[in-house]
Image (cartoon, rainbow, N blue to C red):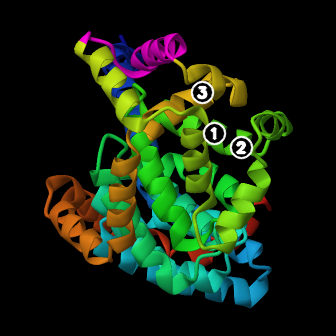
Amino acid sequence: MSNRNMALDVIVRLKDLLTGPLRRLRSTLDGIAGMARKIGLVGGAVAAISFMGPIQEAAAFQQQLLDIAGTSNLVGKAAFDLVENSKAKYEELSLVVGQYSDTIAKGAGQMIAAGVDPTLVDQSIGLIGRSATAANAEFNDMAGVATSLLTTLRMPADQLEGAMAGLVVAGKEGAFELKDMARYFPTLTGQMAKFGVTGREAVNTLGAALQIARKGTSDPAEAANNLKNFLSKILAPETIKNFAKAGVDIEAVMKDAATKGINPIEAVVQKISKLTGISGKEIAGLLKTAKDNGLEGADALASVREQLEKIYGAGKLGSIFGDMQVMDFLIPMLANIDEYKRIRQEVANATGSVIDKDFETQMEGLNRQLTIFNEIGTQAGREGSALPLAPGLPMITRTSLRF
């Protein structure tokens, strides 16, 4: 074999020997490159998630504040000035009252959307936060109470703290707690205002009446509904007609009471008691008997109604208010009129100091401390990760659209 042929043979053999390993090496390198690309994609996704999370939170919070600005008819620079001022205010307040800053922003927006002057919102938002924390109630429910007090009941802003304190006291007087009052109070204030009962007087009346109504029910919702039905039926055409048949001009009774500075709702209850001849002591005794027999709530009231029908007063009572839910309010009210007056006086005497004690206790609890801890993290995320990058987003998005 010539030297040339030998060389060719060697080259062919070397090629055969190296083809397999080279193929495997290439496959290995391709795998490494593919893995690198995957790692890069995963890393990019993780980076995007860690980047987008805080900026999305910051954007959502800013949008809440922009909505408030829009409701206040602010645009452009004025809108963003309000955003910056509100952001600083709500973030600082959140750490003081143990509430989340976005929750405070939602409550403020809710009040402004309901027609509360932004100045009044600024003056009252701290008190609302303290009250919500003190009662462990929902912030938006307490904001709803404040809205009702300031608008429907036309309460001066400087009396708001005392009114909130009154509701705290009322909530401690029985089974109708403050968080329940915060939920149902706004549904009742319109009815009270209709009778000219506004301001602190309305708070005193509703706070006490809800506790009494609760005595005859199994849950707060039922108690609030019974009271609402009573208030809505007092001057219903059918009720006025029924009172007239009994020889009573109920509208005149209420107007005369208002003229003399007497609560017209209480005047109606007193007139019903006299008209029917049913004594509170008698009803209280029937209620006690029903409960001694193991009956509670609506069952106990039904038993009392049945017993009264067998005596003498229920016919007259039923002839005036045919609505069973109205009766279910009147029976415990007539039976506990002295207790109602006592609670109403306690509510009337309440001052802001009662909120302070409950607030301080709640703030020492683990739940509020965790809320503050989480809020600090949220604020740090807004400031550290999101907001410094936010101004560059428009440029990034415009650049992306070119591709």
CB-based contact (under 8 Å), mark 2 and mark 1: yes
CB-based contact (under 8 Å), mark 1 and mark 3: yes
Of helix, strand and loop, which one carries label 1?
Answer: helix
**Amino acid type at image mark 1:** Phe
Task: Classify 10 Å Cα crowding around label 3: few (below 14), some (14-19), many (20 and above).
Answer: some
Of helix, strand and loop, which one carries label 2?
Answer: loop
Circle 1 is placed at which residue position? 230
Q: Which mark is residue 249?
A: none
Q: CA distance from mark 2 to mark 1?
A: 6 Å
Q: Residue at x 38, y 41 (%)?
A: 336
Looking at the rendering, which quadrant does residue 254 occupy? bottom right
Q: Residue at x 19, y 69 (%)?
A: 357
Circle 3 is placed at which residue position? 325
**Amino acid type at image mark 3:** Gln
Which is nearer the N-term, disc 1 or disc 3?
A: 1
Question: Is residue 234 rendered magenta in the image?
Answer: no
